[in-house]
Image (spheres, rainbow, N blue to C red):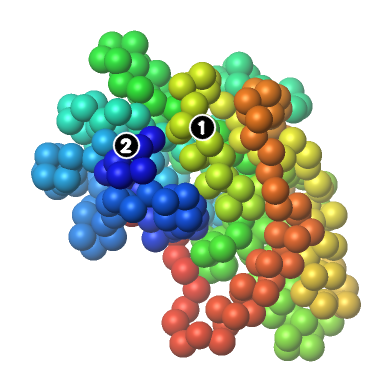
Amino acid sequence: MEKDARIFVAGHSGMVGSAIRRRLLAEGYGNIVTRTRKELDLRDTPAVRSFFLGEKPEYVVLAAARVGGILANIASPGEYLYDNLMIQNNVIHQSYLTGVKRICFLGSSCIYPRECPQPMREEHLMTGKLEPTNEGYAMAKIAGIKMIEGYRRQYGLNGICPIPCNLYGTNDSFDPATAHVLSSLVRKFTDAADEGRDEVTIWGTGAARREFLHVDDAAEAVLFLMDREDAPEVINVGSGTDVSIRELAGMIARAAGFRGKLAWDPSKPDGMPRKCLDVSKASALGFRPRIGLDEGIERTVREYRERKKRPRGPAGPEEA
């Protein structure tokens, strides 16, 4: 991408979008186009059409989405399906119509089958049933990837679809209703330590395994792939290693200074048994994460404590 190119970062106020914007600025890209959700509802087709015709972005990074943890996905599957389909359909279609040079559509590791072989390779997509607790969100993301693939074949749209593992870090949501597992546990253990409580209850058995990547590493991967014409259209992005939720809880408890009891609630769902990506394609291109999980957790605990001191509430779900 040229340093003066007009780059539209959709979802720039969310965790992923804000990290991508920070990375672009740090690399010297100064012509970044953004809109808040109040300024542009990406579900609104005429509004998105007008925006693309007026701004004429040359590159698009589609990081806008309705996202949330297991509780939010269980409660609102239709909303997660509809909102994400509308957002990505509008942005991808207008990118084609207005001649965008390249678009990056961010997927998610939850789109792989629930009983997927491990580690999960790109060719495993659509080979089995999805995890029921996030089926709506996953179906939308699969549709987005297929839209990129179809528009490339039919119209020549140049698109890439990184599939990141579980992301966390700066500007994450700590709202119990929408937070993902790592940020949710950071809030639980940090609050418990700060308030002197002696027990924290955690959903599930702790047996499920997850792979984590700091959002700053994810942003670096996006820029890395956007600048490579030899990058595969669909490519996993992660660390290639996973931990059990029980191990993760112990790491976060230590980082937060919590020394009480961890109480597990097996009546609550674990979600997908394991999610670990095969990142051999990204590794072969030269991408390596820089931030280890211990360091990333320490940063997130510190950032959450700093956020608690501010007058505003926790960030909500990531959207444009």
Density class for disc 2 (Cα within 10 Å; few <14, some 14-19, many ≥20) is many
Question: Where 147 sits versus 180, above or below?
Answer: above
Identify the residue shown where x is 21% and y is 27%: 99
Relative placement, left or right, of 176 versus 17 is right
Q: Residue flagged by tag 1: what amino acid is it?
A: Leu
Report if residue 93 is visible in the image. no
> Label 1 to label 2, Cα distance in Å?
13 Å
Identify the residue shown where x is 57% and y is 68%: 174
Q: Residue flagged by tag 2: what amino acid is it?
A: Tyr
Q: Secondary structure at mark 1?
A: helix
Density class for disc 1 (Cα within 10 Å; few <14, some 14-19, many ≥20) is many
Identify the residue shown where x is 42% and y is 55%: 25
Q: Quadrant of residue 69?
A: bottom right
Identify the residue shown where x is 53% and y is 36%: 224
Query: Are the two marked residues, 1 and 2, in contact with CB atoms closer than 8 angstroms?
Result: no
The residue under label 2 is 59
Label annotation for residue 225: 1
